[in-house]
């Protein structure tokens, strides 16, 4: 049972435009969400997080939106840059087992120059 | 501050052998988590250690085990290797509180022949 889903395996965006990566979850106990970026042969790099008490968190070009009623979160990258091309993973954890991250399957983002 | 380090970076073993992977967390971090990444199953949680105690465990067979030392360094061991154990093994560290961000190392690529 996939508790965290990233339904788009890939996304292609023009440089300078907005990239929107989506993530859905099924477990209502999840209360902390993170986005990681991953290049091949490297470990995931933390980007941004959001707790369930918020609906938006912003850090520079990256903004994460959380819609708890829809069990949906999204990552917005504005403006997109070629260096943003990587695989993006959404992850979630529940307060009672917050050390255990449940990851989505990832979305490969390609930013075209 | 140095990041999470993992050794070795690459490893080739044969079926039936055992392997030990090592992880040194970020200085001051007391929690170490281990994840397995495979093309078919994605990123899956193995276990998490804090102050030398296993706090959480994923759904992996008993062939997968780990431990943490008093300096927070951690090792994971896989016994009786199977072909399906070929994967990227990632270690992540955090300070250990409930919503602390986990920072990942570069991983150890294990190939089982």
Image (cartoon, coloured by chain):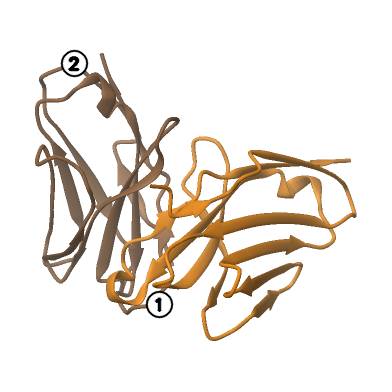
Chain colours: A orange, B brown
From the top left corner, tell me how far across and down residue B48 is, in percent.
23, 60
Whether residue B3 is visible to the viewer of this picture, yes or no, is no
Residue at 9% in and 41% down:
B62
Q: Are marks 1 and 2 in contact (CB under 8 Å)?
A: no
Viewer-side residue, B72 vs B113 = B113
Chain of the residue under label 2: B
Q: Chain of mark 1?
A: B
Q: Position of residue B11 (x, y in %)?
A: 28, 26
Task: Report if residue A82 is visible in the image.
Answer: yes
Q: Quadrant of residue A79?
A: bottom right
Label 2 packing within 10 angstroms: few (<14), some (14-19), many (20+): some
Which residue is found at the position 25% from the left and 19% from the top? B83
Label placed on residue A63: none
Q: Residue at x 10, y 32 (%)?
A: B79
Residue depicted at 48% across the width and 59% down the height:
A91
Screen quadrant of the C terminus of chain A: top right
* Location of residue B57 in the rendering, given as x and y in whole percent from the top left corner: 19, 56
* Same subunit, tags 1 and 2: yes
In the image shown, does A62 or A72 lie closer to the viewer?
Answer: A72
Q: Nearer the viewer, residue A84 or B40?
A: B40
Element type where label 2 sits in the image: loop
Q: Which residue is mark 2?
A: B14
Residue sitting farthest toward the front: A69
Q: Position of residue A64 (x, y in %)?
A: 66, 70
Q: Of the residues tagged 1 and 2, which is closer to the observer?
A: 1
Image quarter for residue B108?
top left
**Distance from Cα at disc 1 to Cα at disc 2:** 39 Å
As drawn, B76 above or below B73: above
**Residue under numbered circle 1:** B99
- Does residue A96 appear left or right of residue A111 in this picture? left
Q: Is residue B105 left or right of residue A50?
A: left
């Amino acid at each position: 049972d996939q508790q965290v889903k990233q339904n788009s395996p890939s996304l292609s965006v023009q440089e300078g435009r907005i990239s929107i990566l989506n993530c859905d979850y099924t477990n209502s106990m999840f209360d902390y969400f993170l986005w990681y970026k991953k290049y091949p042969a490297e470990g995931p790099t933390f980007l941004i997080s959001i707790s369930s008490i918020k609906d938006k968190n912003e850090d520079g070009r990256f903004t994460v939106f959380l819609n708890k009623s829809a069990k949906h979160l999204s990552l917005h990258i504005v403006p997109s840059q070629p260096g943003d091309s990587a695989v993006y993973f959404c992850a979630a954890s529940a307060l009672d087992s917050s050390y255990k991250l449940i990851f989505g399957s990832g979305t490969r983002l390609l930013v075209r120059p | 501050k140095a990041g999470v380090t993992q050794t070795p970076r690459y490893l080739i073993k044969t079926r039936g052998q055992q392997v030990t992977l090592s992880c040194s967390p970020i200085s001051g971090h007391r929690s170490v988590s281990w994840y397995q990444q495979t093309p078919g199953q994605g990123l899956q949680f193995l276990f998490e250690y804090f102050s030398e105690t296993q706090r959480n465990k994923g759904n992996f067979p008993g062939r997968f085990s780990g431990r943490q030392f008093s300096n927070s360094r951690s090792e994971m061991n896989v016994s009786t290797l199977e072909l399906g154990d070929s994967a990227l093994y990632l270690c992540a560290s955090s300070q250990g509180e409930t919503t602390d961000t986990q920072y990942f190392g570069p991983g150890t690529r294990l190939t089982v022949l």
